[in-house]
Image: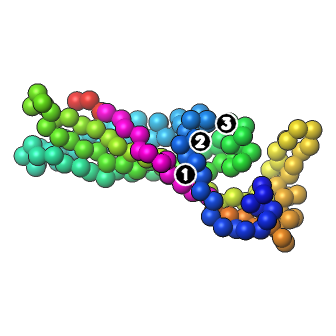
Amino acid sequence: MDHYLRGLGTDLDLDVDRMLTDDAALRQTAEHAIADEREKWRKQALDEFQKAGGRPVALPEETSPQSYTHTDRNWYLAVGSGMTNTTGTVTVVPGDDGKPRVSLDYQVNVWDRYNWDPGKNTPIGPTEVTDADMARLHSTAQDWPESSTCEAADRCSITT
């Protein structure tokens, strides 16, 4: 809120690692997006591995952007809703047993433009704060873009 009221309008980096820990909605959105693509990505990577004669391959992958709304109260009040997708690399290498070993290294990306939407309101304690009230401060305050990715890519193994 301070960022808005000071009228900076500069980009604000979000702590996506913390968001993933704290907020079930973002975590589940990312998990479901990966689950929806996992088998397709695995098959594509194994096909490329075979075409490469069993040599290691790495394929970049990306899920479609999806909207989500935070369920953690603190993240909801700080960010509200946003967009997310997952980017990563599916890698296939020969395993010690001669069978291909498939893995996925990925990161979760989040972005939004912090702004105020007509018709919305948020109860904060005994007060009902409307987006219209906040938007009226726009003569001195300024919206800003928010975005970030998780610091360290999570690692997920896909077994074949």
Q: Does the magenta stretch include residue 151?
A: yes
Q: Distance between the residues labelled 3 and 2?
A: 11 Å
| Three-letter amino acid code at the position of disc 2 | Met
Residue 40, position as x, y percentages in the image? 30, 41
Q: Earlier in the sequence, mark 1 or mark 2?
A: 2
| Three-letter amino acid code at the position of disc 1 | Val
Quarter-wise, where is residue 21 in the image? top right
Labelled pair 1, 2 in contact (Cβ < 8 Å): yes
Residue 83 appears in view: no
Q: Which of marks 3 and 2 is nearer the N terminus?
A: 2
Location of residue 101 with respect to 109 vertically, above or below: above
The residue that label 3 is drawn on is 71
Judge left or right: residue 63 versus residue 29. left
| Viewport quadrant of the N terminus | bottom right
Q: Is mark 1 on a helix, strand or loop?
A: strand
Q: What element carries label 2?
A: helix
Packing grade of label 1 (10 A; few <14, some 14-19, many >=20) is many
What is the magenta range?
A: 146-157
Residue 33, position as x, y percentages in the image? 45, 41
Q: What element carries label 3?
A: loop
Q: Main secondary structure of the magenta part?
A: strand
The residue that label 1 is drawn on is 110
Judge left or right: residue 142 versus residue 11. right
Judge left or right: residue 22 versus residue 158. right
Q: Residue at x 70, y 68 (%)?
A: 9
Q: Which residue is drawn at 9% across and 43% down?
A: 54
The residue that label 2 is drawn on is 19
Labelled pair 3, 2 in contact (Cβ < 8 Å): no
Packing grade of label 3 (10 A; few <14, some 14-19, many >=20) is some
| Three-letter amino acid code at the position of disc 3 | Thr
| Viewport quadrant of the C terminus | top left
